[in-house]
Amino acid sequence: MKVYTKTGDKGTTALFGGTRVPKHHIRIESYGTVDELNSYIGLIRDQDINPLYKNVLIEIQDRLFTVGAILATPPEKEVLKNGQQRLNINRISDQDILFLENEIDSMDAALPQMTHFVLPGGHTTVSYCHIARCVCRRAERLATHLNELEPTDVQVLTYLNRLSDYLFVLARKLSQDLNADEVKWIPRKQ
C-alpha cells in the first residue's frame, strides 16, 4: 500500500464511510487537532519523566485514536447497512473519564494548593505539557463547534475537557518532580 493516494490533491479528503469533504471542514479540523494533540503527548512521553506518567500517556494516546475515529465518522455513516456499527472499537467510556479523574486526584494530592494562575514554563517538559493542554482546549472547542452542527458522542467532549485538566495538573506535578520554578501570575495593580 502506498502512502500517497493522490485523492486529496484537489483539497478534499474522505471521512469514514466515504463522504468527501474539503480539508478545512470542521470535522477534519476537529480530528486533525486531536492528531496534533496526540503528537504533543508523544513528545511529553519522550522526555525523562516517571515511567508511571509514560504509561498513563500511552493510554491517553490510545484513547485519542478512538476520539479521532469517532470524530472522523459522520453521524449518518455510523451504522452500516447490516445494522452493525462502522467503528468496531471500544468507544470512550465513563471508565476512561474516571481514569483521568483518578490520575488528576492522585497528582493533585501531592501538590501545594493553587492560589494563583501560573505562568507556563520553568522546564522544557513542563512547557510541552502546557502546549499540549492548549492544543487539547482547541480540540475541545472545535469538537463542541462540530457538535453544534452535527451531534457527536458527548463522551468525546467530556474526555477532551477532562484531558486538558489532566495535562494542567501533570504540568504542575512535573514542575514539582523536576524542581522547576512555578511562577505565579500576579496581576499588576493600576
Image (spheres, rainbow, N blue to C red):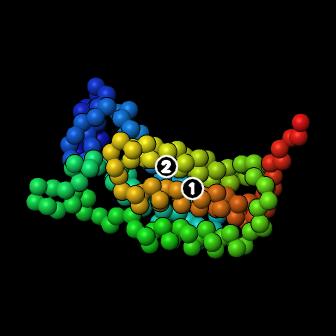
Local SS, label 1:
helix
Specify the amino acid type for callout 2. Answer: Glu
Residue that extends furthest to the right in the rendered view of this protein: 190
Task: Using the image, determine if residue 114 lies above or below residue 99.
Answer: above
Direction from residue 17 to residue 157 in the image, left or right = right
Q: Residue at x 74, y 68 (%)?
A: 111
Q: Classify the position of the C terminus by image quarter.
A: top right
Residue denoted by label 2: 140
Write the residue at 79% across / 59% down: 115
Q: Is residue 187 left or right of residue 124?
A: right
- Name the residue rendered at 29%, 41% in the picture: 3
Looking at the rendered structure, the secondary structure element under dot 2 is helix
| Marks 2/1: CA–CA distance | 9 Å
Front position in the image: 62 or 157: 157
CB contact under 8 Å: marks 2 and 1: yes
Foreground of the two, 126 or 15? 15
Residue at the limit of the structure toward the top, as seen here: 10
On the image, the x and y values in percent for residue 70 come to 33, 54
Horizontally, residue 11 falls left or right of residue 108, namely: left
Which numbered disc, 2 or 1, marks the residue that appears first in the sequence?
A: 2
Label 1 crowd bin: few (<14), some (14–19), many (20+), radius 10 Å = many
Mark 1 = which residue?
164
